[in-house]
Image: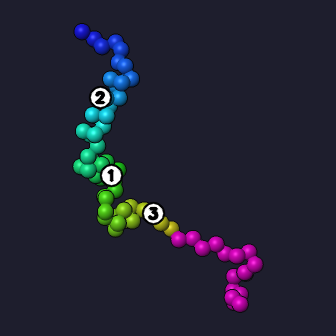
Amino acid sequence: MYINYVSKLEFLCSFRKAFFTSITERTIQGGFIGAGLMLYDLERVLSKLDIKLYMPISPTLQPGTLLP
C-alpha cells in the first residue's frame, strides 16, 4: 500500500516529531565539527581564519614624509 496524499496537519505533526528527535546538542556539535569548526574553542576557530592585516596609505602622505 502506497501513501499518495498527506494532509498538512499530518505532515506538521510528523515533521515536529522528527525535528525535535533529530535536533540535539550532539547533532548540532557534529555539524560544526563537520564544517571544520569546534564549538566553544575560540582558538581553533580563529586558527582556521585567513586574516591579513591591511592598512591603506593616505593619498596625501607620500612615502618618506613625517606624520604631523
Residue furthest out toward the front: 9
- Residue 25, given in percent of the width and then of the height, sits at 26, 50
Nearer-the-camera pick, 20 or 41: 20
Residue under numbered circle 3: 50
Residue at figure coordinates x 72%, y 81% from the top left:
61
* Residue 14 disc label: 2
Secondary element under disc 2, as helix, strand or loop, is helix
In this picture, residue 63 sits left or right of residue 34? right
Nearer-the-camera pick, 39 or 54: 39
Residue at figure coordinates x 24%, y 49% from the top left:
26
Give the Cα distance between marks 3 and 1. 18 Å
Mark 2 Cα shell of 10 Å, populated few (<14), some (14-19), many (≥20): few
Residue at figure coordinates x 26%, y 46% from the top left:
24
Q: Which residues are magenta?
A: 53-68
Tag 3: amino acid: Asp
In this view, 53 is above or below 40: below
In this picture, residue 58 sits left or right of residue 22? right
For discs 3 and 1, the disc positioned in front in the rendered view: 1
- For the stretch drawn in magenta, what is the main secondary structure? loop
Residue under numbered circle 1: 32
- Residue 33, given in percent of the width and then of the height, sits at 30, 52
